Amino acid sequence: MYTGIFVTLFVTHIIAAANDFDMLFRLVAGLITLQTLLAGLCLHFLGGDVKHARFPLVALSAGLGWAYADMSFAWSIAIWMIVAGILQILTEKGLKYNTPAQRIDG
């Protein structure tokens, strides 16, 4: 499901860029950015295992950094990868105990 949503957004942003739909392009690029940076959380909401986002996150965040660096190598790509990695770790730690505590009557 995550991959289907990502591919749909990616194709939409290419079509929007090709047709000079600037507002749509920016909206979809923002959604792609959020989906990439919060991959583990997105998987959690879709009913998947948060840990499955670990390895794809490296490639997705590198691609995101590449796009924001105007399709050229730059040190900022590493920043995107580090930020995404930190968010993934925080998501995994935050969802480690995702069941609410039992209330005690009495």
Image: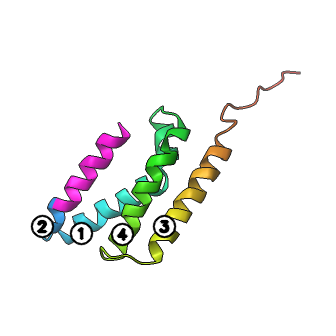
The answer to which of marks 4 and 2 sits earlier in the sequence is 2
The local secondary structure at tag 2 comes to: helix
Q: Disc 4 residue type?
A: Trp
Residue at the limit of the structure toward the right, as seen here: 106
Q: Considering only vertical position in the picture, is 54 above or below 22?
A: above
Q: Disc 1 residue type?
A: Met
Q: Disc 2 residue type?
A: Ala
The answer to which of marks 2 and 3 sits earlier in the sequence is 2
C-alpha gap between disc 1 and disc 3: 23 Å
Looking at the rendered image, the disc whose residue lies closer to the viewer, 4 or 1, is 4
Where does label 2 land, which residue?
18
Disc number for residue 66: 4
C-alpha gap between disc 1 and disc 2: 13 Å
10 Å crowding of disc 1: few (<14), some (14-19), many (20+): few
- Residue 51, how many percent across, how many down? 55, 40
Looking at the rendered image, the disc whose residue lies closer to the viewer, 4 or 2, is 4
- Residue 49, how many percent across, how many down? 52, 34
The local secondary structure at tag 3 comes to: helix
Where does label 3 land, which residue?
80
Q: Give the range drawn in magenta.
A: 1-14
Looking at the rendered image, the disc whose residue lies closer to the viewer, 1 or 3, is 3
- Residue 63, how many percent across, how many down? 36, 62
C-alpha gap between disc 4 and disc 3: 9 Å
Where does label 1 land, which residue?
23
